Image (tube, rainbow, N blue to C red):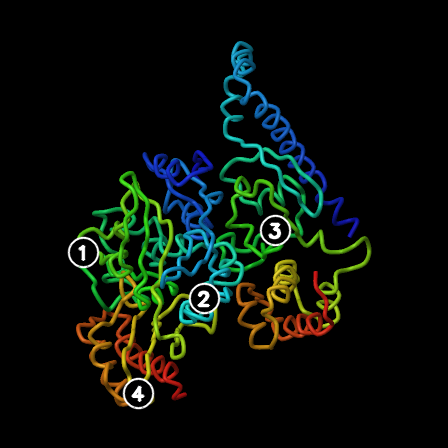
Amino acid sequence: MIQFQYERASTAKAAVSALANNAKIIAGGTNLVDLMKRNVMAPAKLIDINSLPLRSIEQQNGKMIIGALALNSQVADDKLVLEKHPLLSKALNAGASAQIRNMATVGGNMMQRTRCSYFYDTALPCNKREPGSGCGALEGVNRMHAIFGTSDKCIAVHPSDMCVALVALDAIVVVSGPKGERRIPFDDFHRLPGSQPEKDNTLQKDELIISVEIPDNTFSKNCHYFKVRDRTSYAFALVSVAAALDLDGKNIKEARLAMGGVAHKPWRLKEAEKALAGKPATEETFRQAAEIAMQGAKAFKHNAFKLKLGPNVIVEALKNAAGLV
Amino acid sequence: MDKYKSDIKPEKEDHHESRRDFLKTSSILTAIAVAPATVAKAAEYNLGEKISAAFETTPVNLTVNGVKKQLAVEPRSTLLDVLREQLDLTGTKKGCDYGQCGACTVHVNGQRVLSCLSLAVMQEGKQVTTIEGLAKGDELHPMQKAFIKHDGFQCGYCTPGQIMSGIACINEGHADSKEDIKEFMSGNICRCGAYPNIVKAIQEVKNGGQRS
């Protein structure tokens, strides 16, 4: 690991003002330390924000406010989260391992980098790691890669499970910068690669994530997170789906649907949600919505299986959410 | 065993001596680094090169297995490397060193974490428990006994991590069923495939009402 300076920030303001000249924020460090060991990232300075008071989970004024430093395991096991947003708890427990969830924070989970093997291997080209060097995955081993929103510069996927649940739940990201606080709808936080795959998200260089807010909803009874991966546990998603339904008897009043493992950002499926609203909660309805969800999907040499797997995972997730399984 | 030890002794000793010398130098120089007047004086004595090494270390206070430790660490040193290399607590194993195998699992403030992905400098004031801290004298921890009874290992390399993780799994309340244990122990890989016996050992401790 290349040497770096280490600083502990005692206030959010101090952390933000120290964020210059190749400095990086460190919280749990589960992804950043890994990337630094592999020389994929080499910050000149680390700013440790663990002493900031950003660990609480509170309910107020019709929304839940989760501090950016709340641990993944803390959120997954939180009584209030289990009662109001079980989808978030299920998604968190589908990610990483118990040890990593004890270290990883909510803000860090959002900021984690792709696990694309070309991004990780410094001997190979990657536009995300080294802009302009090319994309090794485009014509390479791209089994894990994206089928939505790709560009000719990058086909990597965002690896988070938590973020798939948060985008489905219409969460808001609260960030702090030199000009004060800014609120970003979750779907606008992560971005598609376009011509700048080095940018994972819309957080500015001098901003710090403070909290995530989840507005109250009516999905707690009928929700499911279904993740398909190469082994039963402790692996990144091939395809995952967060499904949430507001049911009136057997009819769907409102639906939320998002996918993981398929795009450079957690992939919200708004057209499919519209197709579900007002319909009976049956496998046929779910199958139709899944077809709509997959429109515009484009596979590469090794990930064409995701075109079949995707709609099947959507249908299973919805069946589980509706209690049909 | 004794023969084996004596065979490797010379190399090991050299290695240790040079490391100790380095640590001695760097901890003294850390003290120098925080006192500017002394630094200036050291510069007069042509200690420039050593002082630049000193600037690379940061003092950290830890409690390891109940014993307070004052250490000087490089910011890039992981907790795993400090435990093994500086404190000679080699029970905690380095498997992959990238957070994928769980062999390096220790408890920090009672929570199981991966010491290979934890920077030592970030553990200021924390309580660390390693596999060496479980037994009370000659009396093994119930989880250690259960691993022996149920043959929860073959080569034993992953075992310290499995045991630390297994204790935490029960304390977290994630050991109510075989399925739960398998899911919440998935961060500890055993290439010998002792999984069924590891699950049995954890179940026995859980059912015996034992906590750490």
Dot 2 falls on a residue whose secondary structure is helix
Check the image and report above or below for A269 versus A157.
below
Q: Is residue B67 left or right of residue A275?
A: right
Residue A147 coordinates in the image, percent (x, y): 24, 69
Dot 3 falls on a residue whose secondary structure is loop
In this rendered view, identify the residue nearer to me: A110 or B94: A110
Check the image and report above or below for B163 versus B35.
below
Dot 1 falls on a residue whose secondary structure is loop
**Tag 4 residue:** A281
Q: Contact, CB < 8 Å: mark 3 with mark 1?
A: no
Marking on residue A81? 2
**Tag 3 residue:** B109
Q: Same chain for the residues at labels 3 and 2, yes or no?
A: no
Tell me which corner region of the image, top left, top right, bottom left or bottom right, holds residue B12: top right
Q: Is residue A39 left or right of residue B109?
A: left
Q: Nearer the viewer, mark 4 or mark 1?
A: 4
Q: Same chain for the residues at labels 4 and 2, yes or no?
A: yes
Q: Residues within 10 Å of mark 2 (few under 14, many from 20)?
A: many
Three-letter amino acid code of the residue under disc 1:
Gly
Q: CA distance from mark 1 to mark 2?
A: 35 Å
Residue B88 coordinates in the image, percent (x, y): 67, 43
Q: Residues within 10 Å of mark 1 (few under 14, many from 20)?
A: some
**Tag 1 residue:** A194
